[in-house]
Image (cartoon, grey):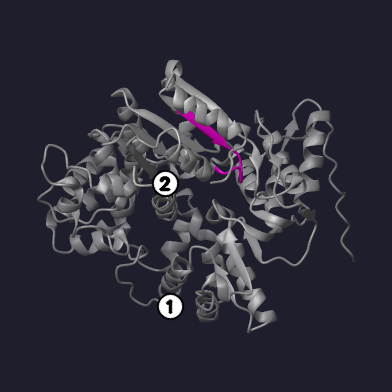
Amino acid sequence: MIRPNEEQMTVADAVASERKRVIAINALAGTGKTTTLAMLAKGPLARTKIRYVTFNARAAAEARRRFGPNTVATTAHSHAWHSLYPNSTKTMAEVFGDRLVRQSLFGEMAQAATADVRLRRSFATAARALHLERSGWRGGISPLLQVIDEFAKSGDAHITAANVPASVVALAKKMNATDNIAALATEARKLWSRQIDPEGTLPIPHGLYLKLASLHPEPIDAEVLFFDEAQDASAPMLRIIEAHVARGGRLVMVGDKHQHIYAWAGAMNAIDALADKFPDTSLTLPLCQSYRFGARIAEAGNIFLDAMGADYRLVGLGPEGSTSDDGQTETILFRSNVKMILEILASQRQDSTRKIHVVGGTKEMVAVLSDLANLHAARPLKGSELAGFADWAELKSFAETPLGSSYSPLVTLVERLRGSVGGIIAGLRRSEIRPAEANFIFSTAHKAKGAQWGSVKLSEEFQNAWEAATAMNTQTHQEYCILPEHEELALQYVAATRAERLLAHRGLLPKAREHLRMMRCKQPVRRPAAQPRAR
């Protein structure tokens, strides 16, 4: 076993003393959080029954391999899936086993409604509430599912108007239907009741049974709960953990609150939330010594930690690496899926034999592009999330609303290609190869979380957040630098700390440094003068 460093020994001593029931380990990038938990499981907690919970199946498998027989490792959803249905002797798996959504929840709900008058009426009521009568009853499917999804990601006990997501509220405003938001929530409550009915038949998503388990959390069969990736906990999982601690259970949670990159999906920073909820019995300890990389790449990560106002800084003790503006790398990280799709195509045009592996796969991108092409060509869609749109014009209008803004770049791309996306799809499918066979690895920064590679290049699009981070002083009429959004800084910190030996930043690091300098000096932004048009 690797000899623990001073920070890890401090953690081990705190866990062994049992003076605090909640130990939070704030582990910066590459500082060995899994190694630390394994050290605890085999050291001071070797005779203790442990339950390890994470959201990542790969991390759960690694824990089963490394932590020893006293630890049961599982994902959060697996924990909920095997817990008891409320007031029943059956598990969630026994109740919902044949009802889990297989492809598209929208499509399967639409299919169920064709044979279910009551369900069609519910969707029609929702469509009327939002003045979407043109789409018929199908127009109410997406808004209702979004309300339920928002509720399922929340810590709330009941569906109310507060669970209507901002995108649906924006749509209601556009359609002059804000007075009907409460009615929409009422309809969502009815649909939720039908979905959780143990005798029901409606399809359910994975988030539903996790939410249900959080509303009636049963005792966890363990003395100590290990909770991994605590910086991005779902509110339902947080409720389950809170119940464990409230019952007198011990908790060791680990994560990096500066990598909190899923707030947009409803994730919460449990490291701070649980320390605030149980202040008298909580202790937070840092891990700052990174063995993934050396001082140069640690310095790159520290730029973003500094911008976020972090209390700690990375200390690079791994292989001495380097940072550069550009260079040949095995991995390229992107800010968005659309940019990655375009780069895949450009790369394959340069060399048709080039093999690219996409982290997380391309099946979702291929499916969406196929559906868009079919809708553009007025071909029928079956079981698709786009099946509720009557035609391309309706989808295009939807993409211009806050509710459908995520479709906008792909709608533009499909229109530019006049629906001929076969080349794009073929290029994406060529990327469905194993990493060991690939010449390059492409990933979004979100999908890169938890991974590391020898050499990493960052797409230029990461600089856009710094370009946009300005504000106008209304008195001086001068433009000044401000900080990008915290979640954007966290994402760039993640991206900058995936490399072990070489980080090719494409100008991001000097851009961030200069921006922070100007912000602190309160130096106004000077934009280049517009060039006169040639006559």
Is 24 a magenta residue?
yes
Relative to 58, residue 172 above or below: above
Q: Type of residue at label 2?
A: Phe
Residue labelled with disc 2: 67
Seen as rendered, the residue at the extreme top is 280
The answer to whether residue 114 is magenta is no
Residue 335 % position (x, y): 61, 55
x, y (%) of residue 54?
A: 41, 45
The residue at the point 63 percent across, 70 percent down is 440
Q: Which mark is residue 377?
A: 1
- Region of the chain picked out in magenta, as a range: 23-32
Tell me if label 1 and label 2 are in contact, CB under 8 Å. Answer: no
* Residue 147 pos. (x, y %): 33, 43
Label 2 Cα crowd, 10 Å radius (few <14 / some 14-19 / many 20+): many
Q: Does dot 2 land on a helix, a strand or a loop?
A: loop
Q: State the residue in front, 268 or 20.
A: 20
Q: Nearer the viewer, residue 146 or 307?
A: 307
